[in-house]
């Protein structure tokens, strides 16, 4: 049997079950493990058909990430709490002996990136090609010699869910290069920074580092961006499977189209408050100085800017306290803090609906439904950038079916997704 086909056979024989369980079967069910096993085996068979050859392929995973605490605090050099999830981009890849990366992603045209010229290309902005080229360039800048590979990729990261499919892709490609070109010499934080470089310089999106860090590191990750060039990264070290709660991402049914102005206004208004004190970001302004100046700031910057600054200070503090609660194993305190953070986003940050279309308030509706169904238990909050898209809810397991049924009765079938915080970030899977 061809060496490439051996991988699919080995997967179906259960020889990779331990590795797959740690990534996907986090509810402990045989059904979840069976689905993960078949997905990986199908991908291995796809690779053998698309890229026939003699090189033995390997499996790689780049997980989506969920923002847990610190809503719009990172761009003010604040603190956040995020986590990798069991929805991911999975790749089957092998060296190709060429000076090119060739990638076949499920549902998309083939992609081939020459590793000769890695300068940014305007025509590739906002594309997967830009991310691959940017990651390759970042690894070359780190001092490694690049080598080509072939890969087939499949994804379960929900589109428009705030789970950051772009970061998952960057981390996936970074791990493939790391294995084939760097001898595993790149740590997760470096892979995350290379992914951010690719997205900023090549893709054209001025994102922070939270998305890539949440995907690359794994588990619940506390990040302090006081020095963005060298953030403090710490894993919270909590096993969410022991919490008695399920994590749900609920699609409100609204879309992110034409919301650029809404998103841009948040850092602009926070920046205007910081500028009053001669600073660029709020993290560099002592909260006591800000509080004393609120009467003047209302006139200079407006009430909404003041409220958004109050949110920054409160949610920056809240994100750090959430991490402390998890590290202490105090999940009830963690839930109270999530609830507090969610209220601050709703009332102070004001990123649950857009002034451009006041008829569309799907996120506040979803949050209202969630609160009614939870009846004081669990916690929920806007997820990600806001204004449209998804909410996040921690739901007691004995309420899970009622919660999902109740949300989908209003929002539509398939809109409530049950996910898990997985302990492992971007990686190459190893048979155990």
Image: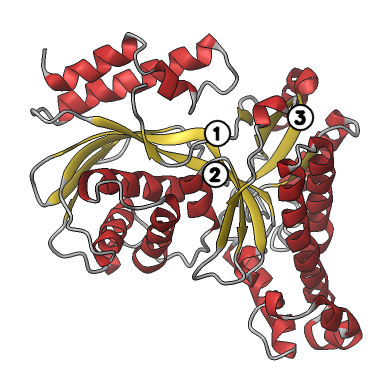
The label shown at residue 142 is none
Dot 2: what SS? strand
Tell me whether the residue at label 3 lies in contact with that at label 2, contact meaning CB atoms closer than 8 angstroms: no
Q: Which residue is mark 2?
A: 65
* Mark sitting earlier along the chain (3/1): 3
Dot 1: what SS? loop
Alpha-carbon span between mark 3 and mark 2: 18 Å
* Mark sitting earlier along the chain (3/2): 2
Residue at the image position 34 percent from the left and 62 percent from the top? 125
Q: Which residue is mark 3?
A: 395
The quadrant holding residue 252 is top right
- In the rendered image, residue 258, in percent from the top left (x then y), is placed at 57, 60
Alpha-carbon span between mark 1 and mark 2: 10 Å
Residue at the image position 84 percent from the left and 58 percent from the top? 347
The quadrant holding residue 80 is bottom right
The label shown at residue 422 is 1
- In the rendered image, residue 220, in percent from the top left (x then y), is placed at 61, 43
Query: Horizontally, is 194 left or right of 354 in the view?
Result: left
- In the rendered image, residue 134, in percent from the top left (x then y), is placed at 30, 61
* Mark sitting earlier along the chain (1/2): 2
State which quarter of the image contains the C terminus.
top left
Query: Horizontally, is 182 left or right of 34 in the view?
Result: left
- Mark 3 neighbour density, 10 Å: few (under 14) some (14–19) many (20 or more): many
- Mark 1 neighbour density, 10 Å: few (under 14) some (14–19) many (20 or more): many
Q: Mark 1 or mark 2, which is nearer to you?
A: 1
Pick the front one: 319 or 201: 319
Alpha-carbon span between mark 3 and mark 1: 17 Å
State which quarter of the image contains the N terminus.
top left
- Mark 2 neighbour density, 10 Å: few (under 14) some (14–19) many (20 or more): many
Residue at the image position 39 percent from the left and 52 percent from the top? 187
Residue at the image position 24 percent from the left and 51 percent from the top? 182
| Residue 111 seen | no
């Amino acid at each position: 049997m061809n060496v490439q086909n051996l991988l699919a056979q080995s997967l179906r024989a259960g020889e990779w079950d331990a590795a797959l369980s740690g990534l996907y079967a986090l509810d402990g069910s045989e059904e979840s493990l069976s689905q993960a096993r078949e997905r990986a085996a199908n991908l291995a068979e796809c690779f053998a058909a698309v890229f026939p050859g003699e090189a033995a392929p390997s499996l790689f995973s780049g997980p989506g990430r969920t923002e847990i605490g610190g809503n719009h605090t990172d761009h003010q050099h604040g603190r956040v709490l995020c986590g990798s999830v069991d929805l991911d981009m999975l790749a089957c890849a092998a060296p190709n002996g060429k000076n090119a990366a060739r990638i076949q992603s499920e549902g998309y045209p083939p992609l081939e990136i020459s590793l000769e010229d890695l300068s940014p290309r305007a025509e590739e902005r906002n594309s997967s090609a830009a991310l691959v080229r940017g990651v390759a360039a970042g690894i070359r800048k780190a001092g490694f010699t690049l080598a080509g590979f072939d890969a087939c990729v499949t994804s379960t990261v929900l589109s428009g869910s705030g789970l950051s499919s772009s970061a998952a892709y960057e981390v996936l490609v970074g791990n493939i290069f790391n294995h084939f070109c760097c001898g595993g010499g790149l740590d997760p934080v470096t892979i995350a920074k290379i992914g951010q470089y690719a997205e900023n310089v090549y893709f054209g999106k001025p994102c922070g580092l939270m998305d890539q860090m949440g995907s690359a590191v794994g588990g619940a990750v506390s990040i302090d961006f006081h020095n963005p060039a060298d953030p403090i990264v710490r894993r919270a070290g909590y096993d969410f499977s022991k919490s008695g709660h399920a994590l749900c991402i609920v699609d409100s049914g609204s879309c992110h189209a034409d919301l650029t102005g809404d998103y841009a206004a948040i850092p602009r208004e926070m920046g205007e408050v910081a500028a009053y004190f001669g600073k660029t970001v709020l993290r560099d302004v002592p909260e006591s100085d800000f509080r004393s100046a609120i009467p003047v700031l209302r006139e200079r910057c407006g009430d909404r800017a003041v409220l958004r600054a109050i949110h920054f200070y409160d949610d920056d503090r809240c994100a750090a306290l959430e991490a402390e609660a998890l590290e202490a194993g105090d999940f009830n305190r963690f839930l109270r803090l999530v609830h507090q953070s969610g209220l601050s986003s709703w009332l102070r940050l004001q990123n649950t609906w857009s002034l451009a279309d006041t008829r569309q308030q799907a996120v506040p509706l979803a949050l209202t439904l969630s609160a009614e169904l939870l009846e004081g238990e669990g916690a929920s909050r806007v997820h990600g950038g806001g204004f449209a898209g998804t909410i996040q809810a921690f739901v007691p397991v004995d309420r899970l079916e009622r919660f999902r049924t109740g949300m989908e009765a209003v929002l539509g079938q398939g809109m409530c997704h049950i996910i898990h915080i997985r302990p492992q970030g971007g990686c190459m899977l190893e048979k155990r």
